Amino acid sequence: MALYTMKELLADAQEKRYGVGFFNTHNQEMLRACVTAAEELRSPIIVGTAEALLQYSDFATIAPMMLEMARNAKVPVAVHLDHTYNFDNIMRALRSGFGSVMYDGSRSSYEENVRVSADIARVAHAMGAGLECELGCVGGLADGDNQVDENVYTDPDMASSFVELTPSYFLAVSIGTVHGVYKSTPKLDLGRLAAIRSRVEAPLVLHGGSGLSDDDFRATIAGGICKINVYTDIITAGKKAIADNMALGYSDILMAAENAMCEAVKEKLRIFESAGKA
């Protein structure tokens, strides 16, 4: 099957009101777990990597693997570069054939975020790719000085003007989720999401999906979320499988982790109601 773009996948999801899962990967086992899960459930899926994950698998190694597996998948698979701050990494992804990239300007002022996002959007669009941006800030990530981002909720009126000024194909919003492990039960601002949805036509993205309840996922999708990012829940499943199978040989340990991650991905695809949509 041909390589798909995130724009193609999210257009269908937005029309039919389901969510498409995005899963960061940084090795063959994670990548294969995601694609296998999507194939078994006949679900579209988005796979990718992020700037912070390149320390585990460099771009020259992981990018060709993702693109090749996506091209050969039996279901629509898009390849996306997540949370990126460096323009050179964005260009590497675009030149490699990624259908979309995310520039994260959430640590900048609104004006700076708009200016840089607009510049990158022009480049990405000229190369036939889509740009995801973040307005507000989904907390939990650490910068180069190990300072952890705090949550800054997305302003609905600013979201409308931001998409017009950039223009972004996809907008990541902050409504109460955080990256990584939740320290307390998340409380999502669904009213804010509804206000953003009423002002923004672009597909909306939810970061920090690990740890949300099934009802949370369903409520955000009903409220207009089209793409849900999940990472921590998947690697947690793999880590547990490794711990539970330490008596096995190395290759069998890796296979146990891959199978566990595949099941974790399938669980999410069912909740997102993307199963059977491919």
Image: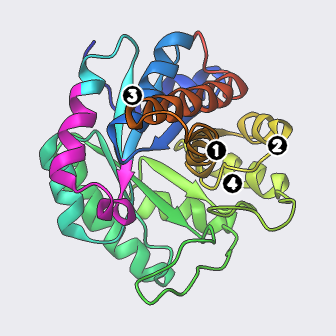
Q: Label 1, label 4: how many angstroms apart (C-alpha)?
A: 38 Å
Residue at the spot of label 4: 196
In the image, residue 98 above or below residue 149: above
Residue at the spot of label 3: 32
Please name which of the two marks, 2 or 4, marks the residue nearer to the observer: 2
Q: Label 2, label 3: how many angstroms apart (C-alpha)?
A: 25 Å
Residue at the spot of label 1: 240
Label 4 sits on a secondary structure element that is helix
| Residue type, mark 3 in image | Arg
| Residue type, mark 4 in image | Ile
Given residues 117 and 157, the one toward you in this image is: 117
Please name which of the two marks, 2 or 3, marks the residue nearer to the observer: 3
Q: Earlier in the sequence, mark 3 or mark 1?
A: 3
Our reading of the magenta stretch's main secondary structure is helix
> Quick one: label 1, few (<14), some, or many (20+) residues within 10 Å?
some
Q: Label 3, label 4: how many angstroms apart (C-alpha)?
A: 35 Å
Question: What residue range appears in magenta?
Answer: 49-68
Residue at (70%, 47%) from the top-left corner? 198
Residue 110 screen position, x and y as percent = 50, 79
Please name which of the two marks, 1 or 4, marks the residue nearer to the observer: 1
Q: Earlier in the sequence, mark 1 or mark 4?
A: 4
- Residue 204 lies left or right of residue 66; in this view the side is right
Residue 71 screen position, x and y as percent = 24, 21
